[in-house]
């Protein structure tokens, strides 16, 4: 309870303090680094090291692009420059993703080794090291990788000022649970004098966002958590109807908890004159599983789509493989593989990103099957509805 109270004071206090400062590069960057420092300097070191990697990789790729354009359009030069920038991109992805996997699965690997050792030796006395996951690692890793990929795809030029780029990486309101911001949308706002300044309207909007977020988190989500955890902790002593109600209520609890945090983050950022992207769009009103994920954690869903799903789906190697499958096994199988393979990769990655262990892997496969079923059955359902003249806009259909 005291931690929550101090969290409220910190957010409201930092909001008021920031409003009396100028938008110079060293000021905001310093305040954002303070946020990491109070959690432990080692977490700030992680962010700085990765930011240096992303910063220099993007700048080097941008330099190669400029050199290629200045050298003319001769094919051999274009291929040489493209190959070099691609190697830098691959190396950056391997290092960043490898670091993320190491930090997320180091403790799990140790537990597995300890279990095997205990089984073979008959004792579990083996020394292990507990590794704490760095604060916000997944989010600033994704933000940095998205930035490097955008520069590689020539969507915008790289940032030449490291302090400005570091500010984008460690901007604290969204670093813990999102939203995952794109550099071209967030980075430019930091250095716009007309945006980052004291404004009464933005302060009012900030207090509304933060007040609503704290209400959802403290008065809705945390109260629901007491009931849900109490019921599910003792399933043998609770009637089935109560357990079913607790399971249904757990979805609302997670939504109120997560979206409450996002509202607080949007409020704090709004007070600074920085607008964060919308991360939820009334997901509880969704009519299908795909629509749910278009409304839930929207910044993560769009990141998967833009940086994994679409690049894989349109890659020459994947299209060539789909063509071979269609030729050898028929048009239907080729289309099925083209739809299913990128989805399977996305949902396995999503499951393993959310947590470690077989439970999260099964969770990802579960949603993959739901998505695949939705895509596969959609044409049949359209014909079915059309044949029976069902009005899909009626209230009775929505209730059904």
Image (tube, helix red, strand yellow):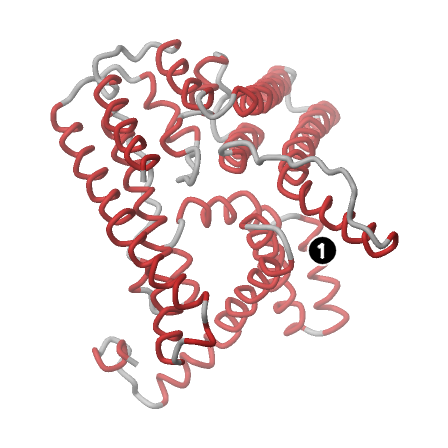
In the image, taking residue 125 as reference, residue 265 lies left or right, namely: left
- Given residues 129 and 93, the one toward you in this image is 129
Above or below residue 296? Residue 378 is below
Above or below residue 284? Residue 47 is above
Few, some or many residues within 10 Å of mark 1 (<14, 14–19, 20+): few
Quadrant (top left, top right, bottom left, bottom right) of the C terminus? bottom left
What percent of the width, then of the height, locates residue 291? 38, 62
Above or below residue 328? Residue 83 is above
Please give the name of the residue rendered at 63% of the width and 74% of the height, measured from the top-left corner: 332
The extreme bottom residue here reads 388
- Given residues 138 and 131, the one toward you in this image is 131
What percent of the width, then of the height, locates residue 62? 57, 20
In the image, taking residue 68 as reference, residue 40 lies left or right, namely: left
Residue at which label 1 appears = 320
What percent of the width, then of the height, locates residue 341? 64, 60
- Given residues 123 and 334, the one toward you in this image is 123
- Given residues 169 and 115, the one toward you in this image is 115
Please give the name of the residue rendered at 38% of the width and 11% of the height, measured from the top-left corner: 25
The extreme right residue here reads 121
Please give the name of the residue rendered at 25% of the width and 30% of the height, measured from the top-left corner: 270
Above or below residue 351? Residue 149 is above
Q: How many labels does the image show?
A: 1
Dot 1 falls on a residue whose secondary structure is helix
């Amino acid at each position: 309870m005291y931690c929550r109270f101090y969290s409220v004071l910190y957010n409201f206090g930092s909001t008021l303090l920031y409003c009396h400062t100028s938008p110079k590069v060293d000021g905001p960057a310093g305040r954002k680094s303070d946020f990491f420092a109070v959690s432990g300097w080692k977490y700030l070191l992680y962010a700085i090291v990765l930011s240096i990697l992303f910063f220099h990789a993007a700048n080097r790729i941008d330099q190669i692009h400029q050199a290629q354009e200045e050298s003319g359009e001769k094919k051999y030069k274009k291929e040489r420059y493209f190959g070099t920038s691609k190697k830098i991109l691959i190396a950056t992805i391997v290092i960043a993703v490898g670091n993320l996997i190491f930090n997320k699965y180091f403790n799990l690997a140790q537990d597995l080794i300890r279990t095997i050792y205990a089984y073979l030796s008959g004792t579990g006395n083996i020394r292990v090291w507990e590794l704490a996951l760095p604060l916000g690692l997944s989010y600033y890793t994704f933000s940095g990788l998205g930035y490097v990929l955008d520069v590689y795809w020539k969507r915008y030029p790289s940032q030449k000022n490291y302090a400005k780029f570091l500010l984008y990486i460690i901007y604290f309101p969204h670093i813990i649970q999102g939203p995952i911001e794109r550099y071209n949308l967030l980075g430019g706002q930091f250095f716009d004098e007309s945006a980052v300044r004291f404004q009464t309207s933005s302060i009012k909007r900030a207090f509304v966002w933060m007040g609503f977020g704290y209400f959802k988190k403290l008065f809705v989500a945390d109260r629901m958590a007491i009931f849900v955890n109490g019921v599910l902790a003792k399933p043998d002593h609770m009637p089935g109807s109560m357990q079913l109600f607790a399971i249904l209520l757990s979805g609302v609890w997670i939504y109120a908890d997560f979206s409450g945090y996002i509202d607080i983050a949007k409020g704090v950022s709004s007070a600074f004159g920085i607008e964060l992207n919308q991360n939820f769009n009334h997901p509880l009103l969704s009519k299908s599983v795909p629509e749910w994920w278009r409304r839930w954690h929207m910044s993560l869903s769009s990141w998967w789509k833009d940086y994994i799903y679409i690049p894989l789906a349109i890659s020459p190697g994947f299209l060539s493989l789909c063509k071979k499958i269609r030729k050898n096994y028929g048009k239907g199988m080729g289309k099925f593989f083209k739809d299913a393979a990128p989805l399977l990769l996305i949902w396995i990655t999503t499951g393993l990103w959310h947590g470690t262990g077989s439970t999260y892997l099964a969770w990802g496969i579960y949603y993959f099957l739901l998505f695949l079923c939705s895509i596969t059955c959609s044409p049949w359902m359209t014909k079915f509805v059309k044949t029976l003249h069902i009005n899909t806009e009626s209230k009775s259909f929505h209730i059904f």
